[in-house]
Amino acid sequence: MLHETTDPLMRAELFSVSQLQRHARTLAGWHELTSARGHDDWLLVRLAENEVVLRDAYALVSDAVHRGRQITPAAEWFIDNYHLIEEQIRTARRHLPRAYNRELPRLANAPTAGTPRVYHLALELISHAHGRVDGEALRAFIASYQDIQALRLGELWAIPIMLRLALLENLRRVATAITEGRREREAAAGWITKMMAAAERNPTDVVTVLAELVAANPQLTTPFVAELASRLQAQGTALSFPMTWLEQRLAEAGQSVEHMFELATQSQAADQVAIGNSIGSLRLLGATDWRDFVEAMSVVERTLRGDASYGTMDFATRDRYRHVIEGIARRSALTEEDVAHAAIRLTREHSGRMAHVGYFLIDNGRRTLESTAGMRRATAMLLR
């Protein structure tokens, strides 16, 4: 029977920037957050699983190279850049501590229950960009999502690590396809070796080997058929009978050798593009100024700039102010954006030094802002 691999690649319809923007708004309208905090380490577990799959794929392909086997262009890309993949796995693990992972808002209606919202966004972007991420598309995607739902500051800071995890997921799926294709081609080559040995002993013995192949009933995947047909054709009349059998089997399934060759070529090209895009995107992540990205995307940042003096401060001070906003929102029923607006409103109700937003964030006015936001104070804070 004809059979294809079951681990789907992350290749949804390729979207333009404007299509990505529409898709982001659709996702924002569909996403529902759960009030439950995350208590599992699913992302870290998946990262560990991906690491094993990628390491095994590297070992398999490297072994094929050492044995003089021909490998696909995608496999060449993979082994040439495996050192970068290992580095990205270490970076992902280092930048996703368990406590941070559990703080991220999670989806109630994701395909995998409890998936962090920002990880689902990363997967969607990687899928519809076929692994290629650039600054323009990313900013347009996130900005359009926030037209409907604002992301929290912690989520914006998590975007680079979530993109890294999504790209590693994409690479894992391509590596799985490469691995399965390598094994299928090795299996096909094994049958050809048996047939050639039989033909050298006695041409009629080829029928016996073919009978063994039929009895084994291998899954006729694209890599298996393409390798088998290519090697049979190379042997000419010596293995013409097995070639006729293969053509008949394919015809029964509505296929042909030529079509299987086309499918194999298309699949290898798509794998090569996916590998190349993913590797290029991983490099981009390391070269991006994420501080600039977060400030450009943050609704809290945009709100706080309602205080004219805020924009003149250095990054460290602005970041300190934003962290205060996060902390108050976490202990109140307000969103981070609501807390930021409350702080700006208080400055407009006062004059002098109290007209500066910093007074209500890190100075004596903080209690006033906390009270305005209805912040729940921890027992330890109440006892001070």
Image: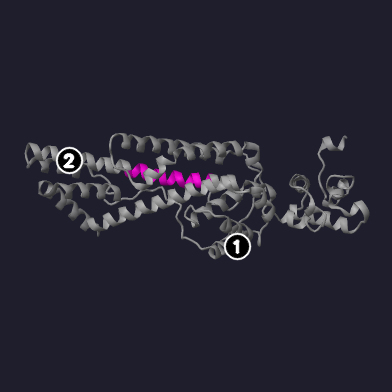
> Of tags 2 and 1, which is closer to the observer?
1
Reply above or below: 384 against 118: above
Query: Alpha-carbon neighbours of circle 1 within 10 Å: few (<14), some, or many (≥20)?
Result: some
Task: List the residue tagged with mark 2.
Answer: 212
C-beta proximity under 8 Å, tags 2 and 1: no
- Amino acid at the residue labelled 2: Glu
Main SS, magenta residues: helix
Residue at point 66%, 62% (across, down): 147
Whether residue 143 sits left or right of residue 175 in the image: it is right
Q: Residue at (31%, 34%) from the top-left corner?
A: 66
In what quadrant of the picture does the C terminus appear? top right
Work out whether residue 112 or residue 46 is closer to the camera in this orientation and state it: 46
- Other-residue count near label 2 (Cα within 10 Å), few / some / many at <14 / 14–19 / ≥20: few
Q: Is residue 85 magenta?
A: no
Q: Position of residue 143 (x, y in %)?
A: 64, 59
- Residue 82 spot, x, y in % from top left: 44, 39
Residue type marked 1: Arg
Q: Which residues are magenta?
A: 165-181
Which circle's residue, 2 or 1, is located before the other in the chain? Answer: 1
Disc ID at residue 132? none
In the image, residue 81 sits, relative to residue 246, either above or below, namely above
- Secondary structure under tag 2 reads helix
Query: Foreground: 225 or 92?
Result: 92
Q: What residue would you read off at disc 1? A: 25
